[in-house]
Amino acid sequence: MTQLDARPLAGDGAGGSPDGTRGVRTKGLGGNSVGLMGSAVIGISTVAPVYCLTSTLGSTAGEVGLQMPAVFLAGFLPMLLVAFAYRELNRVMPDCGTSFTWTVKAFGPRVGWMCGWGLVIATIIVLSNLAGVATSFFWLLAGEITGSESIAALDGNKAVHIVTVLILIAAATAVSYRGMTATKGVQYALVGLQLLVLGVFIAMALSKAGEFETSLSFSMEWLNPFAVQSFAAFTAGLSLSIFMYWGWDACLTANEETTGSDRTPGRAALIAMVVLVGSYLATGVAAQMAVGSGDKGLGLANPDTSDNVFAALAGPVMGPGLGILLFVAVLASAAASLQTTFIPVARTVLAMSAYEALPPSYARVNPRFKTPGRATVVAGIATGVFYTVMTLVSEHVLIDTIYALGLMICFYYSITAFACAWYFRRELTRSARDLVFKGLFPVVGGLLLAAVFAKTLYDMWDPAYGSGSAVFGVGSVFVIGVGLLLLGVIIMLVMQRRSPAFFRGEILTRDTPSLVVKD
């Protein structure tokens, strides 16, 4: 069995290299806490398939119409190619900093720092949205159980909504703080529940096809991405589709806590991706056959229900009794992902601090739970503040931040993919396998995501992009996305003055020794 030597140096609170020299540093995390199945479950949970479907199924249908299943497949392709890049990099550098650590070693400290920032801010965005969806379904479920419309309507009370969100964030932070063992036990139950209920929904949606006015018969044309009405619509739908796969790399950020850290996380990520694409295709096809993708009635693109599709379809498709299960599944999906999504952000911040790219206090690991305690708590606070501010500023925060999230995802995934090809550039001619998995696949995946990033950046300037809201005539999605990237640049410049050694390339370089892997 291959395992990572995760022993911290004595007296080194931030961790140090295994041999006591400058190197890729251990962090003091609890090793061998998760196996292959547990790692795959964490990846699936972080993506939160039921949450993703209810919050983006309608928006994607609104952008690309009946070609929604085709766009799900198109979004899967670059993510799969990038997953191979992650797998290859993790084999030689099983470090919880993942994208940050790898891109620093490939492209230098500044590119690496911004890549790490992209991951961190994308995670904060999705954490806030997860908490918002979980809150909405909590009050909807409470209303269904009690039969009280007034209780269900509490979600519409902004003060009640925000307080509930903050309570959920605090609870998820507390569970994540207690470590991977607590995380794994909760996730098996929650992931199993949501996939089971999703399977029931798919079966019942197929059985209801033809019963509604908007029902449609299946057509192979639904799987043709070239049938989308415009390239702008395709890239908008693709950005949403890419968001729906985001989170599988949580398997990799938990690598220092996984058995067989150099191989198991990569395999778990590929398993998670296969489960996700199957779930999305089956749900998309079944939902379109049942209610269509139009903007009237139960149609998926109806603007009144498109940001929370399952809330509208639960009763009509599954009936009042089983419909409650769909509410439970969405709540479980959002709550489970809310908890596991702290894994990548906390461990990325931990790694950035361990390599002196962030203040050293964030490198502290709780001695009892072996978790990045301070980084986890700060991530929870940042999530609560971000959601509160955005909710008070914009009534359309959910949809606009999801569109902005797609930009962040394309940003740091594409850089990581290119980092793989560049890091292994001298090995690409050794064998056909190296050429394909270390060079060709990562480059193609990176180019696809970079193209989506560039086109999305251009399109989101228009206020009509996303929810249609604007700031001084500029689309709010553009303001959110670009503003957060510029904030990262400002913080990086501040850290450059405080931690000059990292930015001079004295801490982490291509030739820095990697973590010790023992057989």
Image (cartoon, rainbow, N blue to C red):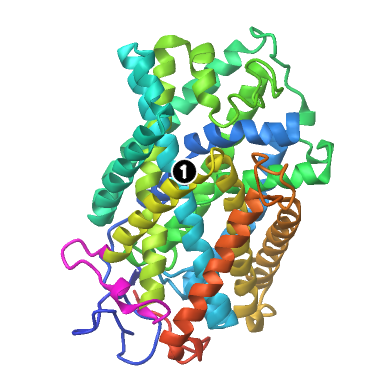
Q: Nearer the viewer, residue 204 or 376?
A: 376
The picture places residue 370, in percent across and down from the top left corner, at 23, 65
Is 410 displayed left or right of 361 in the figure?
right
The residue shown at (66%, 20%) is: 299
> Looking at the figure, which quarter contains the C terminus?
bottom left
Question: Does the stretch in magenta take in 351?
Answer: no
Is 182 displayed left or right of 251 in the figure?
left
Is 391 displayed left or right of 66 in the figure?
left
Q: Nearer the viewer, residue 11 or 77?
A: 11
Quadrant of the rendered structure where residue 422 is? bottom right
The picture places residue 323, in percent across and down from the top left corner, at 44, 16
The residue shown at (65%, 24%) is: 302
The type of residue carrying mark 1 is Leu
Residue 341 in view here: no
> Looking at the figure, which quarter contains the N terminus?
bottom left
In the image, residue 495 sits, relative to residue 448, either above or below, namely: below
The residue shown at (52%, 52%) is: 270
**Most prominent secondary structure in the magenta stretch?**
loop
Q: Nearer the viewer, residue 192 or 91?
A: 192
Circle 1: is it few (<14), some (14-19), or many (20+) Cα within 10 Å?
few
Is 115 displayed left or right of 78 in the figure?
left
Instruction: Give the residues in magenta.
Output: 354-373
Question: Does the stretch in magenta take in 370?
Answer: yes
Residue 130 in view here: yes
The picture places residue 128, in percent across and down from the top left corner, at 44, 47
The picture places residue 78, in percent across and down from the top left corner, at 66, 55
In the image, residue 350 sits, relative to residue 76, either above or below, namely: below
Q: Can you identify the residue that label 1 sits on?
A: 392
Quadrant of the rendered structure where residue 171 is? top left
> Residue furthest toward the left?
368
